[in-house]
Amino acid sequence: MGRKVVIEPVTRIEGHAKVVLHLDDQGNLETARFHVNEFRGFEKFCEGRLFFEMPQITERICGICPVSHHLASVKACDQIIGVTPPRPAQLLRELMHMGQIIQSHSMHFFELAGPDLLLGFDCDPATRNVVGLYQANAPLTVKAIKMRKFGQEIISRLGERRVHPNFAVPGGVNTTLDLKSRDAMLAQIDEMIAGCNEAIAIFKGWMEKNAEDMRKFASFATSYLGLVDDTDALNLYDGNARLVDKDLSLIERFDPRMYLDYICEHVESWSYLKFPYYKKLGWPNGVYRVGPLGRLNAATHMATPLAQKEFELYRQICGGKVVEGTLYYHYARLIEDLYAVERARELLLDPDILSSDIQGSGKVANHEGVGVIEAPRGTLWHHYWVDDNGVLEKVNLIVATGNNNYAMSRAVEEVARTYVDPKNITQGALNRVEAAIRAYDPCLSCSTHAVGRMPMEMIVLDPQGNEINRVERSS
Protein backbone atom coordinates (compact mmCIF):
# COMPACT_ATOMS: atom_id res chain seq x y z
CA MET A 1 0.00 0.00 0.00
CA GLY A 2 1.06 3.58 -0.58
CA ARG A 3 1.39 6.14 2.17
CA LYS A 4 0.16 9.63 2.91
CA VAL A 5 1.97 12.79 3.89
CA VAL A 6 -0.32 15.15 5.77
CA ILE A 7 0.21 18.89 6.21
CA GLU A 8 -2.13 19.91 9.02
CA PRO A 9 -2.94 22.61 9.76
CA VAL A 10 -2.15 24.84 6.79
CA THR A 11 -0.71 27.88 8.53
CA ARG A 12 -1.00 31.64 8.04
CA ILE A 13 -4.44 31.49 6.45
CA GLU A 14 -7.91 32.31 7.79
CA GLY A 15 -9.76 29.12 8.67
CA HIS A 16 -8.83 25.47 8.85
CA ALA A 17 -7.49 23.20 6.11
CA LYS A 18 -5.07 20.36 5.49
CA VAL A 19 -3.17 18.99 2.53
CA VAL A 20 -2.72 15.26 1.93
CA LEU A 21 -0.06 13.99 -0.46
CA HIS A 22 -0.88 10.46 -1.65
CA LEU A 23 2.18 8.35 -2.57
CA ASP A 24 2.11 5.10 -4.52
CA ASP A 25 3.87 1.83 -3.62
CA GLN A 26 7.12 3.11 -5.11
CA GLY A 27 6.93 6.33 -3.10
CA ASN A 28 6.00 8.53 -6.08
CA LEU A 29 3.36 11.26 -5.78
CA GLU A 30 -0.02 10.10 -7.08
CA THR A 31 -2.27 12.99 -6.09
CA ALA A 32 -2.28 15.95 -3.75
CA ARG A 33 -5.55 17.05 -2.17
CA PHE A 34 -6.44 20.36 -0.53
CA HIS A 35 -9.04 19.52 2.12
CA VAL A 36 -11.18 22.21 3.71
CA ASN A 37 -12.20 20.54 6.93
CA GLU A 38 -14.59 22.95 8.58
CA PHE A 39 -18.31 23.47 8.15
CA ARG A 40 -20.24 26.73 8.52
CA GLY A 41 -24.01 26.77 8.10
CA PHE A 42 -24.85 30.42 7.47
CA GLU A 43 -26.95 29.76 4.40
CA LYS A 44 -29.28 27.49 6.32
CA PHE A 45 -29.59 29.10 9.72
CA CYS A 46 -30.34 32.54 8.22
CA GLU A 47 -33.63 31.17 6.91
CA GLY A 48 -36.50 32.63 8.89
CA ARG A 49 -34.67 35.85 9.74
CA LEU A 50 -35.83 39.25 8.52
CA PHE A 51 -33.85 40.39 5.49
CA PHE A 52 -32.74 43.70 7.01
CA GLU A 53 -30.90 41.82 9.78
CA MET A 54 -28.55 40.24 7.26
CA PRO A 55 -25.94 43.03 6.97
CA GLN A 56 -25.23 42.56 10.69
CA ILE A 57 -25.57 38.75 10.73
CA THR A 58 -23.49 37.84 7.68
CA GLU A 59 -20.54 40.04 8.59
CA ARG A 60 -20.07 37.64 11.53
CA ILE A 61 -19.06 34.99 9.01
CA CYS A 62 -15.54 36.41 9.25
CA GLY A 63 -13.39 38.78 11.29
CA ILE A 64 -10.95 39.41 8.43
CA CYS A 65 -13.31 40.55 5.68
CA PRO A 66 -16.57 41.44 7.49
CA VAL A 67 -16.98 44.64 5.47
CA SER A 68 -17.23 42.63 2.26
CA HIS A 69 -20.14 40.59 3.61
CA HIS A 70 -21.69 43.67 5.22
CA LEU A 71 -21.76 45.55 1.90
CA ALA A 72 -22.69 42.63 -0.37
CA SER A 73 -25.55 41.87 2.00
CA VAL A 74 -26.87 45.41 2.11
CA LYS A 75 -26.72 45.66 -1.69
CA ALA A 76 -29.00 42.60 -1.82
CA CYS A 77 -31.30 44.33 0.68
CA ASP A 78 -31.37 47.48 -1.49
CA GLN A 79 -32.73 45.36 -4.31
CA ILE A 80 -35.40 43.78 -2.09
CA ILE A 81 -36.80 47.21 -1.16
CA GLY A 82 -36.25 48.52 -4.69
CA VAL A 83 -34.23 51.55 -3.56
CA THR A 84 -31.03 52.99 -5.05
CA PRO A 85 -29.10 54.66 -2.20
CA PRO A 86 -28.28 58.39 -2.55
CA ARG A 87 -24.91 59.14 -4.12
CA PRO A 88 -23.28 60.24 -0.82
CA ALA A 89 -24.22 56.91 0.73
CA GLN A 90 -22.69 55.05 -2.21
CA LEU A 91 -19.47 57.04 -1.81
CA LEU A 92 -19.31 56.28 1.90
CA ARG A 93 -19.93 52.58 1.36
CA GLU A 94 -17.17 52.45 -1.24
CA LEU A 95 -14.82 54.32 1.09
CA MET A 96 -15.37 51.73 3.80
CA HIS A 97 -14.72 49.05 1.19
CA MET A 98 -11.40 50.66 0.27
CA GLY A 99 -10.50 50.53 3.96
CA GLN A 100 -11.27 46.80 3.90
CA ILE A 101 -9.09 46.25 0.82
CA ILE A 102 -6.17 48.24 2.27
CA GLN A 103 -6.15 46.52 5.65
CA SER A 104 -6.60 43.03 4.20
CA HIS A 105 -4.08 43.30 1.33
CA SER A 106 -1.47 44.99 3.51
CA MET A 107 -1.81 42.37 6.23
CA HIS A 108 -1.60 39.50 3.78
CA PHE A 109 1.52 40.60 1.95
CA PHE A 110 3.55 41.48 5.01
CA GLU A 111 2.24 39.25 7.78
CA LEU A 112 0.96 36.11 6.05
CA ALA A 113 2.94 35.76 2.80
CA GLY A 114 5.80 38.04 3.85
CA PRO A 115 7.66 35.56 6.08
CA ASP A 116 8.02 33.18 3.10
CA LEU A 117 9.06 35.86 0.64
CA LEU A 118 11.25 38.03 2.85
CA LEU A 119 12.76 35.36 5.12
CA GLY A 120 12.74 32.43 2.68
CA PHE A 121 10.65 29.33 2.08
CA ASP A 122 13.33 27.22 3.77
CA CYS A 123 13.66 29.42 6.85
CA ASP A 124 13.26 27.73 10.25
CA PRO A 125 9.49 27.62 11.03
CA ALA A 126 10.27 29.00 14.50
CA THR A 127 11.27 32.32 12.94
CA ARG A 128 9.29 32.18 9.68
CA ASN A 129 6.52 34.39 11.02
CA VAL A 130 5.72 38.03 11.70
CA VAL A 131 7.92 38.05 14.82
CA GLY A 132 10.84 36.82 12.75
CA LEU A 133 10.02 39.44 10.16
CA TYR A 134 10.16 42.14 12.82
CA GLN A 135 13.49 40.84 14.08
CA ALA A 136 14.88 40.87 10.53
CA ASN A 137 13.51 44.27 9.51
CA ALA A 138 11.74 46.20 12.27
CA PRO A 139 11.20 49.48 10.32
CA LEU A 140 9.52 47.64 7.42
CA THR A 141 7.31 45.64 9.78
CA VAL A 142 6.18 48.80 11.56
CA LYS A 143 5.29 50.40 8.20
CA ALA A 144 3.27 47.31 7.32
CA ILE A 145 1.35 47.50 10.58
CA LYS A 146 0.65 51.19 10.01
CA MET A 147 -0.77 50.44 6.55
CA ARG A 148 -3.15 47.87 7.97
CA LYS A 149 -4.04 50.27 10.79
CA PHE A 150 -4.95 52.96 8.24
CA GLY A 151 -7.42 50.64 6.52
CA GLN A 152 -8.95 49.70 9.85
CA GLU A 153 -9.17 53.36 10.82
CA ILE A 154 -11.29 54.10 7.75
CA ILE A 155 -13.66 51.31 8.77
CA SER A 156 -13.88 52.41 12.41
CA ARG A 157 -14.39 56.12 11.61
CA LEU A 158 -17.41 55.18 9.50
CA GLY A 159 -18.77 52.14 11.32
CA GLU A 160 -17.88 52.70 14.99
CA ARG A 161 -15.48 49.75 15.17
CA ARG A 162 -12.77 48.07 13.11
CA VAL A 163 -14.40 44.64 13.01
CA HIS A 164 -18.11 43.98 12.35
CA PRO A 165 -19.05 47.62 11.71
CA ASN A 166 -22.51 49.05 12.15
CA PHE A 167 -22.87 51.28 9.11
CA ALA A 168 -24.69 50.21 5.95
CA VAL A 169 -28.47 49.81 6.10
CA PRO A 170 -30.98 48.99 3.35
CA GLY A 171 -31.28 52.12 1.26
CA GLY A 172 -28.07 53.82 2.42
CA VAL A 173 -25.90 54.24 5.52
CA ASN A 174 -26.72 55.30 9.08
CA THR A 175 -24.14 58.03 9.72
CA THR A 176 -22.43 60.92 7.96
CA LEU A 177 -18.73 61.64 7.69
CA ASP A 178 -17.55 64.76 9.51
CA LEU A 179 -14.94 67.17 8.19
CA LYS A 180 -12.42 66.42 10.95
CA SER A 181 -12.45 62.69 10.24
CA ARG A 182 -12.25 63.32 6.49
CA ASP A 183 -9.18 65.52 6.90
CA ALA A 184 -7.52 63.10 9.32
CA MET A 185 -7.76 60.32 6.74
CA LEU A 186 -6.62 62.53 3.88
CA ALA A 187 -3.53 63.55 5.85
CA GLN A 188 -2.28 59.96 5.81
CA ILE A 189 -2.77 59.18 2.13
CA ASP A 190 0.69 60.21 0.90
CA GLU A 191 2.37 58.07 3.57
CA MET A 192 0.21 55.08 2.60
CA ILE A 193 1.04 55.53 -1.10
CA ALA A 194 4.72 55.56 -0.21
CA GLY A 195 4.22 52.35 1.76
CA CYS A 196 2.50 50.67 -1.20
CA ASN A 197 5.28 51.73 -3.55
CA GLU A 198 7.92 50.40 -1.15
CA ALA A 199 6.12 47.06 -0.91
CA ILE A 200 5.86 46.85 -4.71
CA ALA A 201 9.59 47.60 -5.07
CA ILE A 202 10.43 44.91 -2.50
CA PHE A 203 8.37 42.29 -4.29
CA LYS A 204 9.66 43.23 -7.73
CA GLY A 205 13.18 42.80 -6.38
CA TRP A 206 12.17 39.38 -5.05
CA MET A 207 10.66 38.46 -8.42
CA GLU A 208 13.88 39.35 -10.18
CA LYS A 209 15.97 37.23 -7.82
CA ASN A 210 13.54 34.32 -7.98
CA ALA A 211 12.59 34.39 -11.65
CA GLU A 212 12.70 30.60 -11.97
CA ASP A 213 10.28 30.13 -9.08
CA MET A 214 7.96 32.78 -10.53
CA ARG A 215 7.92 30.84 -13.79
CA LYS A 216 7.34 27.33 -12.50
CA PHE A 217 5.45 27.82 -9.23
CA ALA A 218 1.92 26.56 -10.05
CA SER A 219 1.59 28.32 -13.41
CA PHE A 220 -1.43 26.95 -15.25
CA ALA A 221 -4.21 28.14 -17.55
CA THR A 222 -7.74 29.02 -16.43
CA SER A 223 -10.28 31.70 -17.18
CA TYR A 224 -10.32 34.89 -15.06
CA LEU A 225 -13.23 36.83 -13.56
CA GLY A 226 -13.65 40.26 -11.98
CA LEU A 227 -15.91 43.31 -11.81
CA VAL A 228 -15.24 46.21 -14.17
CA ASP A 229 -16.78 49.61 -14.84
CA ASP A 230 -18.30 50.77 -18.14
CA THR A 231 -14.81 51.23 -19.65
CA ASP A 232 -13.64 47.79 -18.44
CA ALA A 233 -11.42 49.32 -15.74
CA LEU A 234 -11.10 47.47 -12.44
CA ASN A 235 -13.95 48.31 -10.06
CA LEU A 236 -13.87 46.74 -6.61
CA TYR A 237 -17.25 48.04 -5.45
CA ASP A 238 -19.65 47.71 -8.37
CA GLY A 239 -19.92 47.02 -12.09
CA ASN A 240 -20.35 44.21 -14.60
CA ALA A 241 -18.64 40.84 -14.38
CA ARG A 242 -16.01 40.33 -17.08
CA LEU A 243 -14.75 36.82 -17.84
CA VAL A 244 -11.70 36.30 -20.08
CA ASP A 245 -9.82 33.22 -21.23
CA LYS A 246 -6.13 32.35 -21.08
CA ASP A 247 -5.49 34.54 -24.14
CA LEU A 248 -7.27 37.57 -22.57
CA SER A 249 -10.08 37.13 -25.10
CA LEU A 250 -13.53 38.07 -23.79
CA ILE A 251 -15.71 35.07 -22.94
CA GLU A 252 -18.64 36.89 -21.34
CA ARG A 253 -19.58 40.27 -19.91
CA PHE A 254 -22.69 40.09 -17.76
CA ASP A 255 -24.72 41.65 -14.97
CA PRO A 256 -23.34 39.79 -11.92
CA ARG A 257 -26.77 39.85 -10.29
CA MET A 258 -27.78 37.34 -12.98
CA TYR A 259 -25.03 34.96 -11.87
CA LEU A 260 -27.31 31.89 -11.83
CA ASP A 261 -27.47 32.09 -15.63
CA TYR A 262 -23.68 31.80 -15.82
CA ILE A 263 -22.25 30.11 -12.72
CA CYS A 264 -22.74 26.55 -11.43
CA GLU A 265 -21.17 24.80 -8.43
CA HIS A 266 -19.54 21.37 -8.50
CA VAL A 267 -19.22 19.19 -5.40
CA GLU A 268 -16.46 16.72 -4.52
CA SER A 269 -16.77 14.18 -1.69
CA TRP A 270 -13.41 15.13 -0.14
CA SER A 271 -14.09 18.83 0.57
CA TYR A 272 -16.75 20.96 2.25
CA LEU A 273 -15.85 23.73 -0.19
CA LYS A 274 -17.78 23.79 -3.48
CA PHE A 275 -16.20 24.36 -6.91
CA PRO A 276 -17.84 27.13 -8.98
CA TYR A 277 -17.44 27.12 -12.77
CA TYR A 278 -18.74 28.91 -15.85
CA LYS A 279 -21.88 27.07 -16.87
CA LYS A 280 -21.51 27.29 -20.67
CA LEU A 281 -18.11 25.55 -20.67
CA GLY A 282 -19.07 22.92 -18.09
CA TRP A 283 -16.95 21.24 -15.43
CA PRO A 284 -13.94 21.38 -15.35
CA ASN A 285 -13.40 23.38 -18.55
CA GLY A 286 -15.27 26.33 -17.12
CA VAL A 287 -13.13 26.86 -14.01
CA TYR A 288 -11.89 30.38 -13.45
CA ARG A 289 -9.80 32.38 -11.00
CA VAL A 290 -10.82 35.46 -9.03
CA GLY A 291 -9.08 37.80 -6.61
CA PRO A 292 -6.17 40.10 -7.47
CA LEU A 293 -4.72 38.00 -10.31
CA GLY A 294 -8.18 37.22 -11.70
CA ARG A 295 -9.23 40.87 -11.56
CA LEU A 296 -6.08 42.27 -13.15
CA ASN A 297 -6.35 39.74 -15.96
CA ALA A 298 -10.07 40.44 -16.45
CA ALA A 299 -9.76 44.25 -16.47
CA THR A 300 -8.24 46.19 -19.35
CA HIS A 301 -6.86 49.02 -17.21
CA MET A 302 -6.91 50.73 -13.80
CA ALA A 303 -8.89 53.86 -13.00
CA THR A 304 -6.23 55.62 -10.89
CA PRO A 305 -2.92 56.96 -12.29
CA LEU A 306 -0.27 55.28 -10.10
CA ALA A 307 -1.99 51.91 -10.18
CA GLN A 308 -2.39 52.22 -13.96
CA LYS A 309 1.34 52.85 -14.35
CA GLU A 310 2.11 49.71 -12.37
CA PHE A 311 -0.59 47.77 -14.20
CA GLU A 312 1.14 48.52 -17.50
CA LEU A 313 4.33 46.95 -16.12
CA TYR A 314 2.33 43.97 -14.87
CA ARG A 315 0.92 43.40 -18.35
CA GLN A 316 4.44 43.38 -19.80
CA ILE A 317 5.38 40.30 -17.74
CA CYS A 318 3.94 37.96 -20.36
CA GLY A 319 4.14 40.28 -23.34
CA GLY A 320 0.68 41.69 -22.87
CA LYS A 321 -0.91 38.27 -22.47
CA VAL A 322 -2.50 36.68 -19.42
CA VAL A 323 -0.35 36.28 -16.28
CA GLU A 324 -0.80 32.72 -14.99
CA GLY A 325 1.78 32.08 -12.25
CA THR A 326 0.33 31.70 -8.75
CA LEU A 327 3.06 33.78 -7.11
CA TYR A 328 2.01 36.76 -9.24
CA TYR A 329 -1.05 37.02 -6.99
CA HIS A 330 1.22 38.93 -4.59
CA TYR A 331 2.20 41.50 -7.22
CA ALA A 332 -1.41 41.93 -8.33
CA ARG A 333 -2.48 42.32 -4.69
CA LEU A 334 -0.03 45.15 -4.12
CA ILE A 335 -1.19 46.95 -7.27
CA GLU A 336 -4.74 46.74 -5.94
CA ASP A 337 -3.55 48.01 -2.56
CA LEU A 338 -2.13 51.07 -4.31
CA TYR A 339 -5.36 51.51 -6.28
CA ALA A 340 -7.44 51.34 -3.08
CA VAL A 341 -5.37 54.09 -1.42
CA GLU A 342 -5.64 56.30 -4.50
CA ARG A 343 -9.36 55.63 -4.77
CA ALA A 344 -9.80 56.46 -1.06
CA ARG A 345 -8.29 59.87 -1.73
CA GLU A 346 -10.63 60.46 -4.69
CA LEU A 347 -13.62 59.57 -2.53
CA LEU A 348 -12.50 61.75 0.37
CA LEU A 349 -12.06 64.72 -1.95
CA ASP A 350 -15.52 64.36 -3.48
CA PRO A 351 -17.73 67.15 -2.02
CA ASP A 352 -20.69 64.75 -1.71
CA ILE A 353 -18.78 62.61 0.81
CA LEU A 354 -19.77 65.11 3.55
CA SER A 355 -23.43 65.30 2.54
CA SER A 356 -26.22 64.40 4.95
CA ASP A 357 -28.30 62.87 2.13
CA ILE A 358 -27.40 59.32 3.10
CA GLN A 359 -30.58 57.26 3.28
CA GLY A 360 -33.52 56.14 1.21
CA SER A 361 -36.37 54.03 2.54
CA GLY A 362 -38.79 51.46 1.26
CA LYS A 363 -40.74 48.30 2.00
CA VAL A 364 -40.48 44.88 0.42
CA ALA A 365 -40.85 45.44 -3.30
CA ASN A 366 -39.09 42.35 -4.69
CA HIS A 367 -38.95 38.78 -3.49
CA GLU A 368 -35.30 38.41 -4.48
CA GLY A 369 -32.18 40.46 -3.98
CA VAL A 370 -28.63 39.86 -5.18
CA GLY A 371 -25.64 41.81 -3.85
CA VAL A 372 -22.23 41.54 -5.52
CA ILE A 373 -18.89 43.05 -4.55
CA GLU A 374 -15.19 42.37 -5.02
CA ALA A 375 -13.99 41.15 -1.64
CA PRO A 376 -10.19 41.21 -1.13
CA ARG A 377 -10.11 37.56 -2.14
CA GLY A 378 -12.44 37.81 -5.15
CA THR A 379 -16.01 38.12 -6.34
CA LEU A 380 -18.62 37.68 -3.61
CA TRP A 381 -22.32 36.96 -4.14
CA HIS A 382 -25.16 37.28 -1.61
CA HIS A 383 -28.56 36.12 -2.87
CA TYR A 384 -31.69 36.30 -0.71
CA TRP A 385 -35.26 35.13 -1.33
CA VAL A 386 -37.98 36.61 0.92
CA ASP A 387 -41.73 36.37 1.43
CA ASP A 388 -44.17 39.30 1.47
CA ASN A 389 -43.17 40.12 5.04
CA GLY A 390 -39.43 40.20 4.31
CA VAL A 391 -38.74 36.88 6.02
CA LEU A 392 -35.90 34.95 4.39
CA GLU A 393 -37.00 31.75 2.68
CA LYS A 394 -33.65 30.88 1.10
CA VAL A 395 -30.07 32.17 1.11
CA ASN A 396 -27.24 31.44 -1.32
CA LEU A 397 -23.67 32.64 -0.91
CA ILE A 398 -20.87 32.18 -3.42
CA VAL A 399 -17.86 33.41 -1.54
CA ALA A 400 -14.62 34.70 -3.03
CA THR A 401 -12.46 31.83 -1.78
CA GLY A 402 -14.93 29.28 -3.13
CA ASN A 403 -14.43 30.66 -6.63
CA ASN A 404 -10.72 29.84 -6.29
CA ASN A 405 -11.23 26.33 -4.91
CA TYR A 406 -10.21 24.56 -8.13
CA ALA A 407 -7.20 26.84 -8.51
CA MET A 408 -5.98 26.23 -4.95
CA SER A 409 -6.38 22.47 -5.36
CA ARG A 410 -4.59 22.55 -8.70
CA ALA A 411 -1.81 24.76 -7.29
CA VAL A 412 -1.22 22.35 -4.40
CA GLU A 413 -0.73 19.43 -6.79
CA GLU A 414 1.44 21.42 -9.20
CA VAL A 415 3.76 22.64 -6.43
CA ALA A 416 3.95 19.20 -4.83
CA ARG A 417 5.02 17.64 -8.13
CA THR A 418 7.58 20.38 -8.75
CA TYR A 419 9.16 20.81 -5.32
CA VAL A 420 8.46 17.74 -3.16
CA ASP A 421 10.83 14.77 -3.44
CA PRO A 422 8.84 11.90 -1.88
CA LYS A 423 12.07 10.12 -0.99
CA ASN A 424 13.49 13.14 0.82
CA ILE A 425 10.65 15.30 2.09
CA THR A 426 11.86 18.54 3.66
CA GLN A 427 10.01 21.16 5.69
CA GLY A 428 10.90 23.77 3.07
CA ALA A 429 9.26 21.72 0.33
CA LEU A 430 6.10 21.23 2.38
CA ASN A 431 6.05 24.94 3.17
CA ARG A 432 6.04 25.66 -0.56
CA VAL A 433 2.87 23.57 -0.83
CA GLU A 434 1.31 25.69 1.91
CA ALA A 435 2.55 28.85 0.17
CA ALA A 436 0.60 27.85 -2.94
CA ILE A 437 -2.57 28.12 -0.85
CA ARG A 438 -1.46 31.28 0.95
CA ALA A 439 -0.95 33.06 -2.39
CA TYR A 440 -4.72 33.01 -2.85
CA ASP A 441 -5.18 34.47 0.66
CA PRO A 442 -8.08 32.08 1.36
CA CYS A 443 -10.80 32.87 3.86
CA LEU A 444 -12.12 29.40 4.59
CA SER A 445 -14.55 30.34 7.35
CA CYS A 446 -16.40 32.42 4.76
CA SER A 447 -16.58 29.83 2.10
CA THR A 448 -17.60 26.48 3.56
CA HIS A 449 -21.18 25.35 3.11
CA ALA A 450 -22.82 21.95 2.76
CA VAL A 451 -24.96 20.22 0.14
CA GLY A 452 -26.89 17.28 1.62
CA ARG A 453 -25.00 14.89 3.90
CA MET A 454 -21.30 15.57 4.04
CA PRO A 455 -18.60 12.87 4.28
CA MET A 456 -17.44 11.98 7.77
CA GLU A 457 -14.40 9.98 8.85
CA MET A 458 -13.69 8.69 12.37
CA ILE A 459 -10.16 7.46 13.12
CA VAL A 460 -9.37 5.58 16.34
CA LEU A 461 -5.76 5.73 17.60
CA ASP A 462 -4.08 3.76 20.35
CA PRO A 463 -2.08 5.53 23.12
CA GLN A 464 1.02 5.43 20.91
CA GLY A 465 -0.79 7.18 18.06
CA ASN A 466 -1.17 4.09 15.85
CA GLU A 467 -4.38 3.76 13.86
CA ILE A 468 -6.43 0.78 15.04
CA ASN A 469 -9.78 1.43 13.38
CA ARG A 470 -11.36 3.70 10.79
CA VAL A 471 -15.06 4.27 10.01
CA GLU A 472 -16.21 6.35 7.05
CA ARG A 473 -19.60 7.73 6.06
CA SER A 474 -19.76 8.78 2.42
CA SER A 475 -21.77 11.76 1.16
Image (cartoon, rainbow, N blue to C red):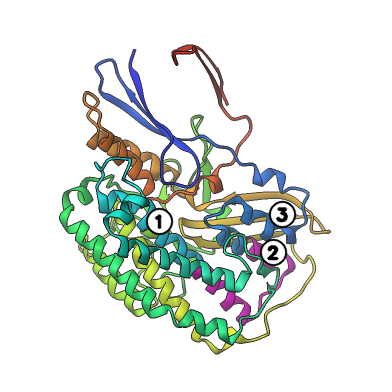
**Location of mark 3 (residue):** 385
Frontmost of labels 1 and 3 is: 1
Q: Secondary structure at mark 2?
A: helix
Q: Residues within 10 Å of mark 2 (few under 14, many from 20)?
A: many
Quarter of the image for residue 74 reads bottom right
Q: Residues within 10 Å of mark 1 (few under 14, many from 20)?
A: many
Image quadrant where one finds the N terminus: top left
Q: Position of residue 377 (x, y in %)?
A: 45, 56
Q: Position of residue 221 (x, y in %)?
A: 31, 48
**Location of mark 1 (residue):** 108
Look at the image and say whether residue 90 sits in the magenta stretch.
Answer: yes
Marks 1/2: CA distance?
30 Å
Q: Is residue 161 left or right of residue 82?
A: left
**Type of amino acid at the residue the image marks with label 3:** Trp
The residue furthest right is 389
Vertical order, 341 against 460 (above or below): below
- Which residues make up the magenta segment? 73-99
Q: Position of residue 467 (x, y in %)?
A: 46, 13
Counting residues from the N terminus, which is met first, the one under dot 3 or under dot 2? Answer: 2
**Type of amino acid at the residue the image marks with label 1:** His
Residue 159 in sight in this render: yes
Look at the image and say whether residue 258 sits in the magenta stretch.
Answer: no
Image quadrant where one finds the C terminus: top right
**Location of mark 2 (residue):** 77
> What secondary structure characterizes most of the magenta part?
helix
Q: Nearer the viewer, residue 327 or 285?
A: 327
Q: Nearer the viewer, residue 318 or 374?
A: 374
